[in-house]
Image (cartoon, rainbow, N blue to C red):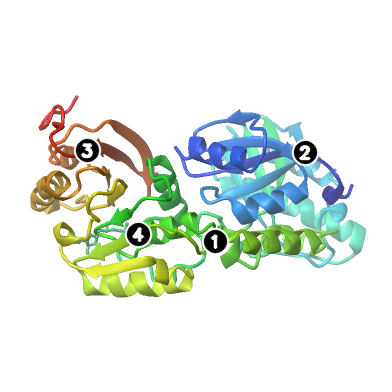
């Protein structure tokens, strides 16, 4: 079995609720989506497809290439069945590999135990065949195997990504409460932004939203910032397809017609960090940085575009009441300064979000660091057109 010569199911995982956006990304790459859940998109393809997906997807976490399924009632059966897989045809003799996984089996209290059983099966098989012992551990910077064990049904995948794709690799300094890059990309791809009109991000923090917007507008995929993927550590991997894909990505980058992108924050440290991160991402020249209160952020007149804010949402006691005024002021800022635009507030606190005082046209669910969040969309009509249902939730 040479896994570089065969087609199989490919499962692409993502953070919960990003499934729709990920499926759109996958379709735009020309793939036929076979199945979709809030956190997984499935297609058929080969390892060349895995390479393309790893390099190009903005909202994915891991690309998993299916190897085999079987039934196992307990850890011993998992070990025995896993040892039957010809790992010597997938992994190199002196490989370093790690196990990722999901386990829901009545006999297993700790999923680490199941991972260790699978690891032992692979190590024992490779040692029997090659007479050398591979090394294993938790680092995801070499080969990786993924276990999905639900009740008695086991599926084994090659994890072709290793370290999560959700981190896009350019962020050198996180700042306080940064948005994960894949989440920021998904939030932007959920808005009405057309990549031609202004993208305004007051309260930019470490700049993730503005930087992701610039990366999207200039066609710079995450693969430009990453040199190491788990697929590179598999047996029979050769560099050609990877280099070909990298060349295509570089050729598709466009620095023309990038619309105005503005990032502002009241904290000089946040603006400083945003600039450093934007430089690392190669998009510094596309972003106008401003040190100011969010209400003084430049919103180009007479345009339509997107104004997107991710304010703090008060996870600690007492913070919420202090933040109420901020959310009220966001509503005023939208009404006074942003007419003609579509306004968005990303928040993990729905009570605070109501203080914006405008009726959201859409409320899109997301998760950020295990907190359920919403992206609220507000139509900010220009001129005499009234903002319907002001001060009302539906
Ligand atoms: C939750 S963080 C934004 C995180 C950001 N999305 C990121 O990925 O790093 C909120 C930001 O709002 C800024 N902020 C708070 N009050 C502000 C105000 N009145 N005007 C402008 N920025 C403000 C804070 O300095 C902080 O950087």
- For the residues marked 4 and 2, what is the alpha-carbon distance in whole angstroms? 43 Å
- Which of the 4 image quadrants contains residue 11? top right
- For the residues marked 4 and 3, what is the alpha-carbon distance in whole angstroms? 30 Å
Q: Position of residue 81 (x, y in %)?
A: 80, 39
Indicate left or right for 378 with 144 as reference. left
Are the residues tagged 1 and 4 within 8 Å (C-beta)? no
Precedes in sequence: disc 2 or disc 1: 2
- For the residues marked 1 and 4, what is the alpha-carbon distance in whole angstroms? 15 Å
Residue 260 has which mark? 4
- Which of the 4 image quadrants contains residue 66? top right
Is the CB–ligand 1 distance for label 3 below 8 Å?
A: no
Q: Nearer the viewer, residue 381 or 279?
A: 381
Indicate the quadrant of ligand 1 in the picture: bottom left
- For the residues marked 3 and 1, what is the alpha-carbon distance in whole angstroms? 38 Å
**Quadrant of the frame with the C terminus:** top left
Residue 350 has which mark? 3
């Amino acid at each position: 079995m040479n896994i570089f010569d065969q087609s199989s199911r490919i499962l692409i995982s993502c953070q919960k609720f990003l499934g729709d956006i990920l499926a759109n990304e996958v379709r735009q790459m020309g793939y036929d989506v076979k199945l979709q859940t809030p956190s997984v998109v499935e297609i058929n393809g080969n390892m060349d497809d895995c390479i393309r997906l790893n390099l190009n997807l903005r909202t994915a976490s891991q690309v998993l290439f299916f190897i085999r399924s079987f039934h196992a009632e307990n850890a011993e059966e998992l070990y025995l069945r896993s040892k039957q897989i010809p790992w010597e045809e997938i992994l190199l003799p002196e490989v370093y590999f790690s196990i990722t996984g999901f386990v829901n089996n009545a006999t297993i209290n700790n999923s680490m135990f199941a991972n260790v059983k699978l690891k032992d099966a692979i190590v024992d098989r490779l040692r029997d065949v090659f007479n050398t012992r591979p090394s294993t551990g938790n680092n995801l910077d070499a080969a990786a195997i993924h276990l999905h064990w639900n009740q008695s049904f086991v599926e084994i995948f090659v994890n072709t990504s290793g370290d999560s794709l959700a981190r896009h690799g350019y962020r050198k300094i996180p700042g306080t409460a940064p948005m994960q890059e894949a989440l920021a990309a998904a939030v932007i791809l959920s808005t009405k932004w057309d990549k031609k009109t202004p993208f305004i991000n007051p309260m930019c923090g470490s700049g993730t939203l503005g930087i992701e917007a610039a990366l999207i507008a200039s066609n710079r995929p995450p693969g430009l910032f990453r040199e190491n993927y788990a697929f590179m550590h598999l047996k029979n991997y050769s560099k050609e397809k990877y280099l070909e894909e990298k060349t295509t990505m570089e050729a598709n980058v466009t620095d023309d017609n990038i619309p105005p992108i503005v990032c502002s924050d009241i904290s000089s440290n946040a603006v400083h960090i945003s600039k450093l991160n934007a430089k690392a991402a190669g998009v510094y020249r596309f972003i106008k940085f401003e040190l100011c209160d969010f209400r003084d952020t430049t919103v180009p007149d007479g345009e339509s575009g997107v104004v997107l804010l991710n304010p703090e949402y008060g996870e600690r006691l007492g913070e919420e009441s202090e933040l109420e005024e901020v959310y009220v002021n966001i509503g005023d800022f939208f009404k006074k300064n942003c007419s003609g635009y579509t306004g968005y507030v990303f928040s993990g606190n729905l009570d605070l979000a109501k203080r914006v005082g405008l009726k959201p046209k859409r409320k899109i669910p997301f998760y950020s660091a295990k907190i359920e969040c919403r992206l609220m969309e507000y139509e900010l009509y220009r001129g005499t057109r009234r903002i319907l249902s002001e001060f009302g939730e539906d």
